Image (cartoon, helix red, strand yellow):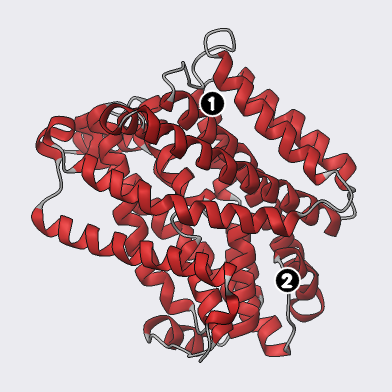
């Protein structure tokens, strides 16, 4: 019995990685900014949303993981094979634009967090570019995955900073378990943002590609499923503590912020120097993590979509398009950050809009693929799962469309 349990544990540890990494990167610089603004403006009142958010995230990520394990193909591959080259082309171009803008935001997060520690962006950004490119080109997937798992561990900084903020845990529990809602335009906009940052198109492409790259077998899928579930739960635990840390300090003090670096600076006189340092370190780690993953996700998706060789287990000479695109996204994104007066806010809004437009197409394609027996065999969704999945997808589509409308026409929300 003990040998069986040990063998099961070893299989689990050999399979985990893609689900946890993908979920954690969801809390990138943009996500942390959104949660920080939510906590600073509305206190603990949005904590309850993290429960349905986690449920939605688990459901969508599980379907993607299942498709990767069963088909041994990336999502771009399946879209091209089943929906044609024309749709694939437009999806890939939209994904490229959105991911490029989001990668710029990640480097902006690195620059902002480093500035808190007194390091110039003109020093730290080139260093990070060299590190990211070198690590990616020199090492195989197994080694790079270990690097990503280490970076995932450092999200614990937000748990510590949340505890150090000394929140009212009774209020925290009440707002987590009891839903509340405000008929307020700005509240609705931030609420959409909190939910909308949870599930983005790049996550689905990266998770499926990394599962294929890892070589997870069908008989190992149950462990991969737990990898997804654990990752989704843990990432929203981190989101929970980000909101708690900011709500317990900035909201209580009536301090408004525009981004996560503002939150880190404002925490210092309210929660102490160590809490501020941990928050800033968490932002740096999250932004660096995102700067690794977003270009990789784009390269995987683009190359799979156009039938080019891809993968971290291949040398540059074996997959030149994959590595060239990866390096180009890194260099272009970093260069934009180094331009004085670069329109960072415009770029971040652009990425949100493009992601919002793209997400409904991706969700519908996913649901059609996972219910296609020619693609999935006996691993199609059950009837009940489909009802829940289509309902969840419909909610996400409505929220992302509402996010787009409120971004373009903020005056339409009049209560």
Residue shown at the point (75%, 51%) measured from the top left = 108
Is 121 left, or right, of 3 in this rendering? right
Query: Is residue 186 or residue 43 the one in the foreground?
Result: 186
Is 363 left, or right, of 113 in this rendering? left
Q: Above or below — where is 371 with respect to 313?
A: below
**Residue 397 makes an appearance in the image:** yes
Which disc is residue 258 wearing?
2
Q: Where residue 159 sits in the image (x, y, percent)?
A: 57, 65
Q: Where residue 130 sits in the image (x, y, percent)?
A: 76, 28
Residue shown at the point (39%, 27%) measured from the top left = 214
Tag 2's secondary structure? loop
Few, some or many residues within 10 Å of mark 2 (<14, 14–19, 20+): few
Q: Which residue is mark 1?
A: 143
* The N terminus sits in image quarter: top left
Residue shown at the point (73%, 71%) measured from the top left = 258
Tag 1's secondary structure? helix
The residue mark sitting in front, 2 or 1, is: 2
Image quadrant assignment for residue 80? top left
Report the residue that reaches farthest toward the top: 317
Sequence order check: which comes first, mark 2 or mark 1? 1
Q: Where residue 133 sits in the image (x, y, percent)?
A: 68, 27
Q: Above or below — where is 156 with respect to 148?
A: below
Q: Give the CA distance from mark 2 to mark 1.
A: 37 Å
Q: How many marks?
A: 2
**Residue 7 makes an appearance in the image:** no
Image quadrant assignment for residue 163? bottom right
Say if mark 2 contacts mark 1, CB within 8 Å.
no
Is 265 left, or right, of 65 in this rendering? right
Q: Where residue 160 sits in the image (x, y, percent)?
A: 62, 66
Image quadrant assignment for residue 385? bottom left
Which disc is residue 70 wearing?
none
Residue shown at the point (66%, 85%) measured from the top left = 251
């Amino acid at each position: 019995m003990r040998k069986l349990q040990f063998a099961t544990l070893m299989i689990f540890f050999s399979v985990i990685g893609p689900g946890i990494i993908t979920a954690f990167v969801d809390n990138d610089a943009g996500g942390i900014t959104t949660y920080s603004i939510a906590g600073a403006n509305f206190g603990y009142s949005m904590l309850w949303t993290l429960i349905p958010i986690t449920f939605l995230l688990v459901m969508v990520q599980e379907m993607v993981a299942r498709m990767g394990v069963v088909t041994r193909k990336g999502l771009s591959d399946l879209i091209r094979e089943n929906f044609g080259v024309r749709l694939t082309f437009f999806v890939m171009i939209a994904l490229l634009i959105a991911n490029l803008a989001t990668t710029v935001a990640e480097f902006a997060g690195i620059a902002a967090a480093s500035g808190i520690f007194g390091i110039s962006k003109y020093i730290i950004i080139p260093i990070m570019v060299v590190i990211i490119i070198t690590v990616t080109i020199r090492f195989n997937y197994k080694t790079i995955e270990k690097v990503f798992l280490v970076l995932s561990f450092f999200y614990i900084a937000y748990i510590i900073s949340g505890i150090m903020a000394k929140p009212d845990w009774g209020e925290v529990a009440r707002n987590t378990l009891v839903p509340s809602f405000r008929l307020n335009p700005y509240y609705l906009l931030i609420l959409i943002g909190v939910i909308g940052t949870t599930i983005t198109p790049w996550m689905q492409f990266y998770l499926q590609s990394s599962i294929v790259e890892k070589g997870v077998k069908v008989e190992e899928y149950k462990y991969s499923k737990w990898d997804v579930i654990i990752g989704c739960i843990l990432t929203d635990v981190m989101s929970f503590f980000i909101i708690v840390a900011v709500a317990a300090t900035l909201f209580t003090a009536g301090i408004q912020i525009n981004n996560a670096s503002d939150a880190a600076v404002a925490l210092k006189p309210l929660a102490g120097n160590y809490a501020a340092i941990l928050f800033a370190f968490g932002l740096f780690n999250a932004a660096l993590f995102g700067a690794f993953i977003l270009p990789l996700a784009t390269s995987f998706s683009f190359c799979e979509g156009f039938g080019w060789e891809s993968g971290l287990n291949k040398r540059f000479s074996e997959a030149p398009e994959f590595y060239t695109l990866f390096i180009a996204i890194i260099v272009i994104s970093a260069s934009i950050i180094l331009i004085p007066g670069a329109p960072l806010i415009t770029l971040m809004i652009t990425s949100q809009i493009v992601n919002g437009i793209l997400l409904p197409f991706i969700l519908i394609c996913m649901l059609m693929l996972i219910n296609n027996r020619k693609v999935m065999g006996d691993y199609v969704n059950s009837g009940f799962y489909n009802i829940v999945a289509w309902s969840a997808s419909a909610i996400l589509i409505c929220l992302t469309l509402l996010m787009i409308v409120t971004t373009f026409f903020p005056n339409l929300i009049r209560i």
